[in-house]
Amino acid sequence: MQNLNEVPNLRDQVVEAIKTIYDPEIPVDIYELGLIYDIKVYPINNVFVQMTLTSPNCPSAEQIPEEVKQKVQAIEGVNDVELELTFDPPYSTEMMSEVAKLELGFM
């Protein structure tokens, strides 16, 4: 049952916003890279994003999560954004979408 306060397709809008964020060292957006582990939209449009980075020592370790939070918060109707950064499971190239693998020559 659709919550009346929920913006239609808010999760899709969150995915689209995240797809505008790129790892500075890789010409593929972080969603296609597989860095986003989970996106949940809770009642009253609170958004939870669980993500990782290509490496715990990633030079963009602070920049990328902050950019994700800002872009998601900027979506009309989003109330609050909670972002969890995790390294479990550790990132691997297996997490990339086929689009990313093709773009980077893995296929």
Image (spheres, rainbow, N blue to C red):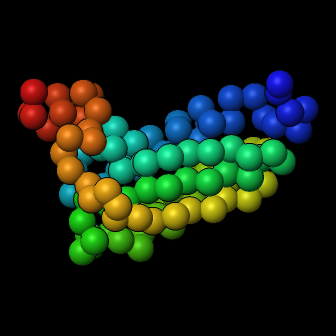
Relative placement, left or right, of 6 versus 105 is right
Q: Residue at x 68, y 36 (%)?
A: 10
The image quadrant that residue 81 belongs to is bottom right
| Residue 102: % across, % down | 17, 28
Q: Residue at x 41, y 64 (%)?
A: 86
Q: Is residue 38 visible?
A: yes
**On-image quarter of the N terminus:** top right
Residue 107 vs 53, above or below: the answer is: above
| Residue 28: % across, % down | 28, 42
Q: Residue at x 34, y 64 (%)?
A: 87
Q: Residue at x 36, y 50 (%)?
A: 35
**On-image quarter of the C terminus:** top left
| Residue 52: % across, % down | 37, 59
Relative placement, left or right, of 32 versus 79 is left
Relative placement, left or right, of 99 versus 102 is right
Residue 73 vs 97, above or below: the answer is: below
Residue 32 vs 46, above or below: the answer is: above
> Residue most toward the front?
89
Image label count: 0
> Residue most toward the right?
4
| Residue 9: % across, % down | 68, 29
